[in-house]
Every structure is written in structure tokens, then in C-alpha cells.
Amino acid sequence: MDSSNYSRTSSQTLSVVEHICAAFIIPIIAVFDFLIFSFANCFEQQPPQYNKHRYGSEHMARLAHQTCFAVNEVEALYELFKKLSSSIIDDGLIHKEQLQLALFHNPDIENVFLNRVFDLFDEKKNGAINFEEVVHGLSVFHPCAPMEEKIDFAFRFHDLGQTGFIEWEDVKQMVADVLMESGIELPDDLLDGIVDKTFADADADGDRRINKEEWKAFVVRNPRLLKNMTLPCLMDVSAVFSSFVFNSTED
């Protein structure tokens, strides 16, 4: 193969990788980037409402120790959490309908990526997210979070059937969902070709599913796959909520 053909082939492979990255990782970032800044704007317009669900200073310190956040940043996240968790049902939990209301101004609008992220944040699998789960989940997107955590989260995001593998059908379903959300339709054979190309790059043993080691190796070869697994605004959460962060400290 001459150099021009090799360059063209490499470019095509990279293009596929970038499309898969856009299909999977960017929607996660879009959900939280929009959520954080939309609620930051809400707090600039009115002070946060305090409810009966309070976390003490020891609890805040423990969460800070477990994650990439400082104590005052955990407190600032709690203000966001209280605002969101009381938008429909004030029970100290975030339900999927509340996220849908915050993002789409309609609690009944479904979104495949929001559903997937919600399921991953819901550590207890009880259909709702508590404050600890929010902090744990957001910490993965912190600029200082270990790369291993980002790789693992992205793997679990793709593992739709929770089988411990990214199945060929999982990738096809997610690509199809991305296209559907964008109003784009592709012939089935073209869609299959995109998925086949991705698996040719990542599925080292050729069994039509990607295990964790294969996924890690794939990401190492293509680090841009995870470049959007970081939310820069999480580097200093207290600055994002500067208008009220001083009110978040326990009396």
C-alpha cells in the first residue's frame, strides 16, 4: 500500500472513531453541561430553597474525601441537587422526570442518552438518584478524575445489556439512536458497515463483542474518544455557583 492510500485509510478509520465518539460520549457531556449551567442561571435569579433534606458537615467531608471535589464544592453541588430534586416531588431524590423537565421543559420527553446516564448514576437501581450518587457520578467527569474511572464509565455506558461486554448489537443500537435523534436515516447495510468498521478496530479477538481490556486498548490508541469525558467547569464548582456558595455552609 503506498503512502497516499495508507493516509486515506487511516483518515477513514479515524473518521469512524470520531463519529462513534460523537455518538456516545458527547451526549453525556451535553446532558451535564446544560444541566449545570442552566441551574447556575436559576440561582442567579433567585436564592436556593432549603428543604428538610439536609446533609451535615461530616457527610459533606466524607463525600469530598471519596471524590475529586473539595468540601465547599460538594456543598455547592448540594444546592444544585436541592433545586432539582424539589422541582416536581420534594422527596430528597432526583427522578428521571425531573431531569427531563430541567433539560427539555417537559417531564414526559424521553431521551435515550439521558436514560442511560440516569441508569448509571442510579447506583442502588431503585429508580431515583440521591445526593451521594450525583456526587459520585459527576466526579468521574472532573478534570482530576483518574483516567481508569473515565474509561470504565464509558464502557458501562456502551454496555446496554449489562453483560460485561460491548456487544455488536449495542453499538448498532446506539448509533441508530443517535441518527434518529438527529432526524437522519441510513440504509441498514451502511449502518452495519459503520459498526463493522468500529469492531474491526476494537474487537481484537474477533468475537463480535468488546471486553473491558479491548475497550481500554482501543481508547489508549484513540485517546480523543475520552477527551469529552471531562467537564472543565467541575474544576471549580464553587465559582460556577459564586452567587450563593457562601450560603451553603452548615450553621
Image: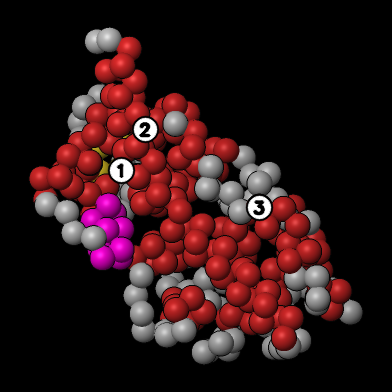
Residue 179 within the magenta-colored segment of the rendering: yes
Residue 107: x percent and y percent?
Answer: 42, 84
User: Which of marks 2 and 1 precedes in the sequence?
Assistant: 2
Q: Residue at x 24, y 10 (%)?
A: 1
Q: Amino acid at mark 2?
A: Leu
Q: Give the residue pinned by disc 1.
A: 166
Q: Can you tell which mark lies on residue 14?
A: 2
- Tell me the mark number nearer the camera, choosing from 3 and 2: 2
Residue 69: x percent and y percent?
Answer: 73, 55
Give the left or right position of residue 92, taking residue 24 as reference.
Answer: right
Q: Secondary structure at mark 3?
A: helix
- The residue at the far front in this view is 4
Residue 225 within the magenta-colored segment of the rendering: no
Q: Give the residue pinned by disc 3.
A: 232
Residue 190: x percent and y percent?
Answer: 15, 45
- Report the magenta residues as a range: 174-183
User: Which of marks 3 and 1 precedes in the sequence?
Assistant: 1
Give the left or right position of residue 161, taking residue 70 as reference.
Answer: left
Give the position of the C terminus as an image quadrant. Answer: bottom right
Q: Secondary structure at mark 2?
A: helix
- Tell me the mark number nearer the camera, choosing from 1 and 3: 3
